[in-house]
Structures are given as C-alpha cells and as structure tokens.
Image (cartoon, rainbow, N blue to C red):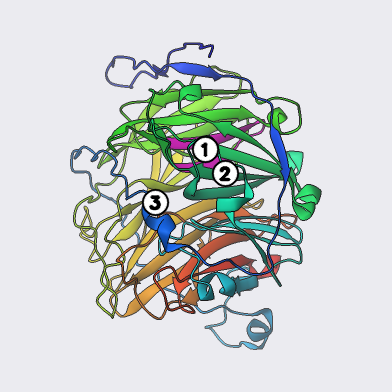
Amino acid sequence: MSTKKSVLKKKAAPAAKKKSAKLTCFKVKSLKPSELKIKYLKKAYKFSDARKTDIIHPRKVIPKIKVGAKRKDLVPTQSMELEKEVTLTAMAKSKGPTAMALTDSVTFSKNVQLADVATADTASHVCEPSTAKNGNVIFYSGNWFAALSINGGTTFSYIDPYSTFPNPPGMSFCCDQVVHYVKSIDTFIWLLQYGRDASGKNIQRIAYATTAKVKTGNWKFYDITPASLGLAAGTWLDFPDLSTSTGMLYMTSNNFNAAGAWKASVVVRIKLTSFTGPVLSASSFKSTTSASFRVAQNCGATAYFVAHKSSSALRVFTWKETLGAPTFDDVNVASWAQTGYSSTTPDGRNWLARADGRHTGATLVGNELWFSWGSAKGGVNNRPHAFVQIARINATTKALIENLSIWNPDFAFFYAGLSTNINNEVGVSVAMGGGAKFPTHVVGILTGTRKLVTTFAGNRGPIDNKWGDYLTVRRNYPNEKQFCASGYVLRLGAGASDATPNFTVFGRSSDV
C-alpha cells in the first residue's frame, strides 16, 4: 500500500501559542468495485440466536473523556416539551390566542412502522436504525436487517445482510449499518460492518446503487480494511458513520485491537467520482488522541467534524476538499457529566445502561455547526435526568454561539441525530424515556420555533437494559424542505430482539 504523509496543523490560539499536533494521512489503495444482484424478501427473516454469540461483539468502550474545567452555561435552555402531531385540517379549525401559526407546527407526511421486523423478532434492542429517501424509494437499515420500499413507505421488502453479500475470507456480517442518499450523483450509499477474522481484522463494506438500480437490486461495493487506512495489523473497525460534502463521502470509524482496547479513530475521505467511475479514490487519516469522530451533515466544499477534548471543550476539525489534511480549533462548552448514565422505565429497566458521551449528531446550517452528544444527569445546570447537549458554533471563527440542551425535568432524552433542510432549519431524531415514560421516539425542529413531536411511544422497557447506539435524520428528497428520520420503540413483538423500527417524514406544516 502506498502512503502519503502530511501534517495536521493546529490554528494558533488567540492568547497563547500552542504546539502543533501531527496526524498522518494515507492514500487508500485504489480498488475496483465488485457487483451483484440482491434478492429482496417479501417478509422479514427470523434472526438466529446463534449469531448473537458467534458474531455480535460486546459493547466496545471508548476512552473516558478528560474532565475539563468547570464552565457555566450563561443562558440555560428551557425544558423541552412535547406536542401532539397537528394536522393542517385541525389547525385551520383552531381559533383563539392558543392557535399556532401554520409555519410553527411540525407534522408528518409519512409515519409508519416496519412491523414485520418486530413480529419476526429480527431487530436488536440496540437497533441503530438508519434511512435515506429519494422520491418513492426508501432504503432502511438496522443493526441486523435492511429494508426497501419503492412505494413511499406503504410497504417494505427486506434484505438479510448475513446472506446477501459474499463473505470475505474468515468473516461474516456483524452489525452497525448506515445508509445515505447523495443527490448530486443520484446514489444510495449502504455501509455494512463485518465481524473479525482469526487475525483480528474486519472490513467496512460500502455498497452503492443509483435510485433506478436500487429498485432492480443491482449494487456495487468496495471493501475497506484497517490496513488500507494505515491502521495496525490485527485491529478492527467499529461504530461507523457516513456524511458528505460537495465532492466527497466521509466514513468515520473507531479502531480496536484484538483485546478490545481502543487504538484510534479514523476519517476516510472518498471522492464521489468513485461511485460513478471505475475505481475507488480515497484518503484517510487517524487520531490516537481523539475518539469517535462525527462529520457534519450537508457540508459544502469544506467538511467539519468533532471529538471531545474534555468534558467542557470540543476539538473541531476543518478539512477543505482542496487540502490534504485538516486543521483544528478547541472550543469551550458548558460542562457536562459523563458518569452515572441511567434512566429507569416504569417496568424497572435501565434503558441507558450502555450509554456514553460520544457524538451522535452533527450538521452544518448556514455558517453554524451543530454538534450533539448525550450527558448523564447533572452537569453545570444540574439536570435531573440524562439529556442531549448541543453546541452551536460559528463555522468561520469557531466561537461558541449557544449551549443548547434537549431536556425535561421528568424524563431523559438521548441518542440525538441532526440534519439540515434546504430552509436552513435543523431537524432532530431523538429517543426519550424514563420516569413515567417507556422509551419513545421523537422528531422535531430546533431552529426558529423549537418543536418536538412523538412518532411512536413504546409500551415496555428493554429486558436486556440496552438501547442505542444512534438514530438518523436526513434531508428528504425531492422535497428538501422536509426531513426523513429513523427511530424505534418496543411495541409489537414479544422476544429479546423485538424492536419495532419506524420511518418518518416530517417538516413544518406549510412545507408538507
């Protein structure tokens, strides 16, 4: 493998000169894609319990974040309340001073559950749902399943990721899928994580197809190994994510050794021409000090991504498409808590037993960066339940604009994904639960008049005390004023793998 080194340079701090940090960048070896025709199933398949012990790895622990200096939140966010979905008809009939402006409310143009997944006991309680949409074509993935609708979500067919693709030598599919749609090349991107072979390595498989070819099942794919990213032999990739800029696809992942210890985090920058041309063209860089990168959604010619520096500071990276390596700035934020993650449901289940503070949402809106993560109860404002903290940051100056919290005095919020629509509004997909509430999926808009709306409410907590690890919200196509989101609850099934995923398209009522 050929390598190309460059240096990650830190911008000078206003008041003090700091040492630069070195980061090695690599040119990923060119690859030609493989191609196959996928079989779509009419019903969800039954998940095999044997796979849980043979393939599914235990929760991997990322390094504990350094405790930073205590920093105040000068303008604490008011608690977030929930509103019921308000239809256009109901709003037209509403009178008096309590009537909302039409543009203030959030409503759904589609809100459906993938019921077959729950009744077939196919979806993990750590469901990790992800979705993307173009017109009537919807692609949806979870930890252990994938699904396709070609009629706008009225019905879904299903894909068994364990048997659909050929297995690399010594490996089989594991988990952690992510999907995305890239409008500029009319292409769905589908990432699948594979389990480790005998040497300890695995792959991240990136499959792709145009909208027309998704319908027919004709997909191409590349396999990305740790070695191709300049990572140590015998290590493996976990907790991936996808984002795009004008000309690039970004894949992020953590890197662990055979014993399960975190070794690095990596960002892979893939030219979008790789999905329209004959070979993969990509570069990558790694950090052995910053864990769990998250690249902002909807970037232009400059990508931005984030990691925690401490419990009161973020490290914000800037990577222009024309440059071989990024720069970074450290941004102070309000102090938050990373110990004591818990939230008890009415039936005594701790649905946040495996939670941590890694970033789960990032998006660019105008000249603002929004980065979200989960805090345990407490923090500088002494919140009574776990909550979502969001930093709004000026993308040019890297000055903090606001410490925004999604919180409520009676229950917890967690696992918030973020995205931006064409109106420069920020959409959120987030889970809530605890107190008198079972885990429930919520979507909303956080710019302008902030509104949160329940999609589906759960009716019990997870018997294995597991939830997460991420939810997604994407820009909807072709109506880019709206968002499409993935979520899930425990509602329809009755087993240990009975999560019920949902697909939701939402926006301001005037934009539906």
244 in the magenta segment: yes
User: Can you see residue 449?
Assistant: no
Circle 1 is placed at which residue position? 204
Pointer 2 or 3: first along the chain:
3
Q: Point out which mark residue 20 bears.
A: none
Q: Earlier in the sequence, mark 1 or mark 2?
A: 2
x then y, percent, for residue 11: 39, 19
Find disc 2 in the rendering and name its residue. Answer: 191
Is residue 282 in the magenta section? no
In-front residue for pair 419/58:
58
Residue occupied by mark 3: 54
Give, as a single range, the part of the protein colored magenta.
239-253
CA separation in Å, label 1 and label 2:
7 Å
> SS for tag 2?
strand
Q: Residues within 10 Å of mark 1 (few under 14, many from 20)?
A: many
Instruction: Determine the secondary structure under disc 1.
Output: strand
Q: Residue at x 29, y 56 (%)?
A: 354
Q: Residue at x 58, y 73 (%)?
A: 116
Which quadrant of the view contains residue 462?
Answer: bottom left
Per the image, label 3 sits on a secondary structure element best described as: helix
| Percent x, y of residue 56 | 40, 51
User: Relative to 134, is 488 on the left or the right?
Assistant: left
The residue that appears at 47% across and 77% down in the rendered structure is 493
Quadrant of the drawing holding the C terminus: bottom right
Q: Would residue 263 appear left or right of 33 to someone viewing this image?
A: left
Relative depth, front residue between 483 and 126 = 126
